[in-house]
Image: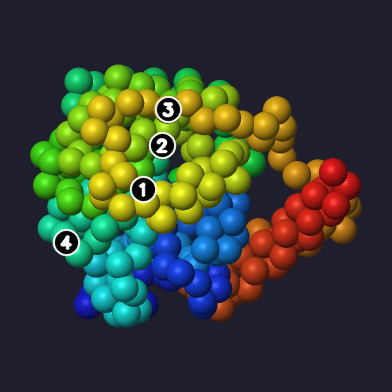
């Protein structure tokens, strides 16, 4: 979708349902981070996962975009798609984008912030880098591969331009202005969004509910997609009046194999890898048709494997 001088890639699943979801990824990465979460949300309504300028191979302007610039862009996408009060989900830097947008759009009534950043008590680059690397040790192998490939496509130059925007954005100033009922989720091993900071986020929000996912790290919506999707759908059915005024942090219940990756047959693996390669070629050649084809091929392989695993259980 063209928005003035910049471009946003909109990936969608489904077209009907109670309410749409709009998913905003973090710095440097693409909507692929939501590939396990989006299908589960699709049971509630259509899902739109965005690739923002500079990320996922989407072209970017010559100068760095601020969090406000990204937020305005997401707002424009929502308006252009004609979405009526979508549930807007932001992960990591995406939580800043969502918070900034919602602080200026009271018509948005439901938000989800996953691993919100940056903790103002630790607004130092080396500190955050250390937290990120320690959290990465608890991420599934697939997430590590996704991160490396995403950062390669993003490129050091653009990443280094946007990083200061993320580090200096004061999300703590935006949170009190948000009227939407907000679900906040963190992983147990997420040092980037530590427990005390997430509790503070809940205190700053006028209406919130806080959850911690045992065994998860910063990319909690990937390894624990089903549990996060369940929380998101339950949240979408709540109202502001259901908010947790005490900002109590709830511990989610997860199955023993929650972070176990779905086993793939040789055919599934070949199809999945083929999809990834097709997507990569599309990113490199700036061909959105190939990107869409690759994402679809990979998603179909993973869906077939997941259905086979569920049947076996």
Tell me which residue sits at (18%, 51%) in the image.
179
Res. 239 in view: yes
**SS state under label 3:** strand
Where is mark 1, residue-wise? 112
Horizontal arrangement in the rendering, residue 105 relative to residue 307 (left or right): left
Where is mark 4, residue-wise? 105
The quadrant holding residue 128 is: top left
Q: How many marks?
A: 4
Mark toward the start of the polypeptide (1 vs 3): 1
Q: Which label number is shown at residue 185?
A: 2
Distance in Å between CA atoms under marks 4 and 3: 28 Å
Distance in Å between CA atoms under marks 1 and 4: 15 Å
| Residue 142 image position (x, y, % from top left) | 64, 41
- Residue nearer the viewer, 166 or 38: 38
**Which quadrant, please, contains the C terminus?**
top right
The quadrant holding residue 295 is: bottom right
Q: Which label number is shown at residue 290?
A: none
């Amino acid at each position: 979708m063209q928005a003035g001088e910049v471009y946003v890639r909109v990936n969608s699943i489904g077209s009907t349902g109670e309410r749409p979801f709009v998913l905003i990824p973090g710095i440097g990465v693409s909507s692929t981070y939501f590939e396990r979460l989006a299908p589960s949300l699709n049971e509630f309504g259509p899902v739109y996962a965005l690739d923002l300028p500079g990320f996922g191979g989407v072209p970017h302007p010559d100068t760095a975009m601020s969090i406000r610039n990204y937020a305005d862009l997401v707002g424009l996408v929502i308006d252009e798609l004609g979405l009526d009060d979508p549930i807007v989900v932001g992960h990591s830097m995406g939580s800043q984008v969502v918070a900034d947008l919602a602080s200026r759009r009271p018509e948005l009534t439901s938000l989800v912030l996953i691993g919100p950043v940056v903790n103002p008590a630790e607004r130092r680059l080396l500190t955050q880098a250390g937290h990120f690397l320690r959290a990465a040790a608890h991420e599934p192998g697939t997430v590590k591969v996704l991160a490396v490939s995403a950062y390669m496509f993003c490129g050091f130059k653009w990443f280094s331009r946007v990083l200061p925007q993320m580090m200096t954005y004061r999300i703590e100033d935006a949170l009190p202005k948000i009227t939407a009922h907000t679900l906040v989720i963190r992983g147990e091993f997420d040092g980037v969004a530590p427990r005390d900071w997430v509790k503070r986020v809940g205190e700053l929000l006028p209406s919130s509910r806080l959850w911690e996912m045992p065994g998860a790290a910063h990319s909690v919506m990937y390894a624990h997609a089903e549990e996060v999707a369940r929380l998101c759908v339950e949240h979408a059915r709540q109202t502001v009046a259901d908010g947790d005024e005490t900002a109590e942090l709830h511990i989610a219940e997860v199955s023993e194999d929650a972070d176990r990756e779905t086993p793939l047959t040789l055919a599934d693996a070949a199809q999945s890898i083929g999809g990834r390669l097709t997507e990569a070629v599309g990113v490199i050649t700036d061909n959105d048709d190939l990107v869409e084809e690759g994402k679809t091929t990979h998603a179909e392989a993973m869906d077939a494997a997941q259905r086979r695993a569920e049947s076996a259980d």
